Amino acid sequence: MYLQIMEQIRRRIAVGDLKAADPLPSIRQLAADLQISVITIKRAYLELERDGVISTQHGKGSAVAESAGLAARIYEQELEKHLAEAARLAALLGLGSRDLQRRVRDASDQLAESAKEPR
Amino acid sequence: MTRSLVWRLIVKDWYLSRSTLAVIAVVGALSVGSLYLRQGLTSLLGMLTALFATIFLGVLMPQQTILNERKRQNLAFMMSLPLSARDYTTAKILSNLLAFLALWLPITIGMIGTVAGTGLYGGIVPLMTVAALAPFVGFALFVAVGLVTESETAALTTMAACNVSYSFVWLFISRIPGFLHDLGSPVAIWQPEIQAIVAGEIGLILGSFGLTFYFQSQKTDFI
Amino acid sequence: MIDLAIELTGVGKDYRLFSLQDVSLALPTGQIMGFIGPNGAGKSTTIRILLGLVHQDRGEVRVLGHRMPAEQVAAKWEVGFASDDMRLYDGATIEWHMRFIRSIFPSWDQAYAETLLKRFDLRAEHRVKGLSHGQRVKATLLMVLARRPRLLVLDEPTTGLDPVVRQELLRELAAVMQDDGRSILFSSHNTQDVEQISDQIAFIDRGRIIESRDKETFLERWRRIRVELPGDVRLPALPGIIDIQQAGRLAVATTNEYDGQLPRAYEAAGVRVHAVESMTLEEIFVSNVQHSREGATA
């Protein structure tokens, strides 16, 4: 469940809702707003801090990390995750790296196609 | 702090039994009133009604405040309040006892006072005393058994047993040598047997309430 | 501030057909504990011992630092208790109950009480007799919440409530937790609610605490590992695996002591790991109870 919270926050940063150095709600406040246990929020914040997405100052609460290009980095992290998963599944299916590359290219082409089509 | 809480519980019991108390109060007032009319039959009827009112109160009040509270699962609500088992028992006994006395005392004093006041029928007074204390004994036992056993059946059975026992009491009294003669006397004659019976009644009343406190304090499962 | 809002150590209680054995629980201040277990497991008994309504035969009980049942009066000033077998008085109105509680507890917050009336969609002038089950539960909870007690002990607060009301209650409980000096213990059959809102989870079955730890660790340690057994490879017995369901070449192993090494251990034995899945609290509940019962009869 803490993963979902992390996702939410990452997403908000990625789309620009939360900008660098923006303060985040206190753990207890967020817990009350979402009706989720404090311990889950704590865990989410902890993991996000470990990933460098947010920074916590003792007594001052948490805020979005200062570093530039944070949004891009978040998407980077997500891409890495998905690639790792794709690699794992490919291995399970017995696909070689060349097959995997081809599949990735196909997917990319498909995306470009659908973007061109009129809505 | 606890004393005001106990008082609040007593008032709460009276509030929740307000309709019963109201009816009994009216009946009781009319009955006592009729005593003072001194109109033979009316007064006699008044006395009897008063007696029945007392008996009813002796059963209805504890039933509503004690047994129903447990039956209707209000007990958990009460015990979630900052009071001990002892506070609860005190409040229950007092709310019932005070209501009962409010009816029983005027009736008893009215009856005995009226008779004694005539200066002619004093001989009846000892018998009347025994009779007046009878509903009180039944009431005390009902409250005690109801609180300790929390069983309506047990309480009602005890009440019934008590009433049955009184037939033996009347029998015993009628056998006291010279009793019938004493009845006709203008002054009250307190035979030692009568005194013993009255003492026994008072003892039972006090004992019931006292033992209630004891047994309640021994309980390890209050709910 | 006291460290532990609730502390039970080795509590035992014997009844003719059932007994609580060696129950130990600790709820740190500012946290919320979900207390789950099958019917008849001893949740209500444990909660009553907490309130001093039942005296334990063995063990120590401390609530907000007060020893129970000896100091129950002191404790009950700051503990709000509501259980599903508790009833308000039929012959009185909600308003009467509010005034009654208010006259006893100085911590009563009238403004909050009125907010709750609106949120719970209750009318103060309604007599308790005419309320539906859900409304009665809400009214009882209102009496307990408006006092803002330092500890809330709720025995099955959401049983029999429709989803809308359940959400309302969860929202109020979550709001309580904004104050890190207040704590909540609630027992529930609704594993979803417990999973969502609890900081600590305690599992009880047949009078014994099976597990009691913080929720995240709980959910971390339970996993379902889906594997495939190629050829004549047999499933190795690994530590921490408490259940195996096998259908042909596919098997599912359940563990309650997961560490990252397990999949690797399987792979090393020639077993192909398809997936490692986390489990919902409901799945853990069922698995936990089965496991502890098998262990008991073994």
Image (cartoon, coloured by chain):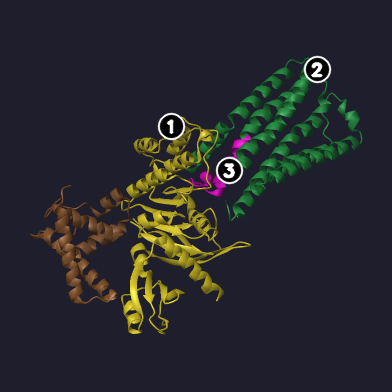
Chain colours: A brown, B green, C yellow
Q: Tell me which numbered mark, 3 or 2, is placed earlier along the sequence.
A: 2
Local SS, label 3: helix
Query: Could you say which quadrant of the image residue C197 lies in?
Result: bottom left
CA distance for labels 3 and 1: 34 Å
Disc number lying in front (3 or 1): 1
> Which subunit holds the residue at mark 2?
B
Query: As shown in the figure, which amino acid type bears the numbered disc 2?
Result: Leu
CA distance for labels 3 and 2: 41 Å
Q: Which residue is mark 1?
A: C123
Q: Residues within 10 Å of mark 2 (few under 14, many from 20)?
A: few
Discs 3, 2: same chain: yes
> Which subunit holds the residue at mark 3?
B
Q: Which residue is mark 2?
A: B41
- Answer whether residue B77 is visible to the viewer in this image: yes
Discs 2, 1: same chain: no
CA distance for labels 2 and 1: 53 Å
Task: Tell me, yes or no, whether the two marked residues, 3 and 1, touch with CB atoms within 8 Å.
Answer: no
Discs 3, 1: same chain: no
Q: Residue C255: percent from the left, percent from the top?
A: 40, 73
| Front residue of A2 and B185 | A2
Residue at left offset 42%, top offset 41%: C142
Residue at left offset 44%, top offset 58%: C35
What stretch of residues is rendered in magenta? B72-97
Quadrant of image for the N terminus of chain A: bottom left
Query: Could you say which quadrant of the image residue B195 lies in?
Result: top right
Query: As shown in the figure, which amino acid type bears the numbered disc 1?
Result: Arg
